[in-house]
Amino acid sequence: MNNIQKALENGQSIWLDSISRDMLRSGELQRFVDLGVTGVTSNPSIFDKAIAESDIYDESLIEYAKDGATRETVFERLAVDDIRDAADVLRPVYDDAGRRDGFVSIEVSPTLAHDTGYTVAEARRLWAAIDRPNIMIKVPGTPAGVPAIKSLIADGINVNVTLLFALEAYKAAANAYIEGLTEFATSGRGNPGGVASVASFFVSRVDTSVDNALPEGHQLRGKIGIANAKLAYAEFSEMFDRNLGGGGSFFPLHTMGAQVQRPLWASTGVKNSDYPDTLYVDGLMGPDTVNTVPEATMDAMLDHGTPGAALTGGLDEARAQIGALGDAGVSLDAITSDLLAAGVKAFADSYESLLGRIDVKLQALRV
C-alpha cells in the first residue's frame, strides 16, 4: 500500500493540483488515479503552463477561433474539453465513492471575485457546458462569493470554495453550504446527498507571510500555517457534528444523507527549502479532508511521507501558537486579509496572462 492509499485509510483524499491535455492523452492522469489519487483541481495558472509548454492545444486553438470567438471564449472551450475528459477519467472513482469523491474543479473567471450575480451566472453556465456530475465549480470565498456559494449549492451545483485564509471566512463558507443545502433539501429538487462541496483553506502562503513578519530564528516560523488550519478543522468538526447531541444545524441534513463540506488543504507545496517537503501533507492528515498537491509534493509524499492522523491532535498547541503570534506583535487577521486581496489579484493576473498567451499562440498560428 502506497502513501496515497494510506492517506485514504486515514480519511483524507489526495487530489492532484495539475491538469493538461498531455496528461490526459498520455494516460498519466489514469496512472495517478491508479495510485489512489481521487480528484483534480485546476486554475488559470495551471492552464497557462499547460498551453505554454506544449503544442497539443494548437489544433483546438485554430478550430475554436474560426468563428471569431473572443480569447475568453476560446479558453473556455479548451478548458471545458479538458475538464470534461478529466471528469470521465475520475467517473469510476465518483461512482465507487457514492458521489462523495472523484471530482474535477474548474474556476469561474477570477475577474468576477467581487460580483455575486455574474459569479452565479458564470458558474451555472460552466456547470451546464461541462455536463458532468463529478465536477466542482471554484468560487472564491470573498464577501461577494459567499452568497454565490449559497445560491449554487441551492441549485444542486457542486462548489469548491477557494482562497480561504481566515477562520471567519472559512465559517462563512461553511454556513453558506449548510444554508444552501438546506434550501435545496426543502425544495424537493433532489437528494441532498448528491451535492458536494469542499472549502479550500490555504496553508503555505500563511507561513510565508508570517515568516516575513517575524525575526530570523523565531520559534513560530513555519508553525502558523498548520496551526491556522488546525483551528479551521476544529470549526469544521463543530459545525458538521453528525451526532444528535451536537445540536448543530447540519444534523438534520445528515439524517437525509447529506455530505459534509470537507476542508481541503490548498497551497501545500513547501515554499521554504528549510522545511520538510512533505510538511503540509504529513502535518494536515485527518478524517473528512482533502489535500490538493502539486506533482513534486506528491512524488515526495510517495517517496518519504509519513501518513498518520496529525490533524486530530495538538489543538491546544495550535491555539497557543496563534496567541503567541499576537503577543509577538504580528496580526494574523491583517495577514489573512492581505493574502485574500493578493490571492484574488494573483488569480486575475494569471487569467490575463493566460489570455495573452492565447493571443500570442493564435498570432503565431496565423489565425
Image (cartoon, rainbow, N blue to C red):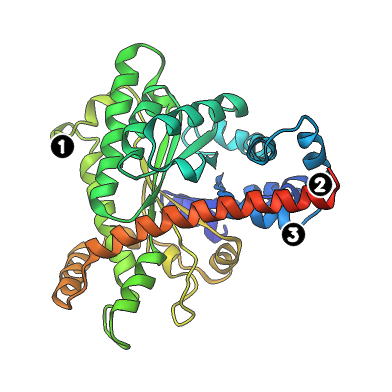
Give the foreground label among 1 and 3. Answer: 3
Name which of mark 1 and mark 3 comes first in the sequence: 3
* Amino acid under disc 2: Asp
Mark number, residue 331: none
SS type, badge 2: helix
**Disc 1: which residue:** 246
* Amino acid under disc 3: Glu
SS type, badge 3: loop
Quadrant of the frame with the N terminus: bottom right
Find residue 144 and report its image quarter: top left
Viewer-nearest residue: 266 or 367: 367
Name which of mark 3 and mark 2 comes first in the sequence: 3
Mark number, residue 53: 3
The residue that appears at 54% across and 39% down in the rendered structure is 102
Q: Is 49 positioned to the left or the right of 17 in the image?
A: right
**Disc 2: which residue:** 58
- Above or below 225: residue 24: above
Q: Is 56 positioned to the left or the right of 201 in the image?
A: right
Asked whether residue 4 is in view, the answer is: yes
SS type, badge 1: helix
Name which of mark 2 and mark 1 comes first in the sequence: 2
Category of crowding for the residue at label 2, using alpha-carbon neighbours closer than 10 angstroms: few (below 14), some (14–19), many (at least 20) = some
Q: How far apart are marks 1 and 3 (CA)?
A: 51 Å
Quadrant of the frame with the C terminus: top right
The spot of residue 124 in percent (x, y) is 50, 26
The spot of residue 61 in percent (x, y) is 78, 42
Asked whether residue 18 is in view, the answer is: no
Q: Is 28 positioned to the left or the right of 130 in the image?
A: right
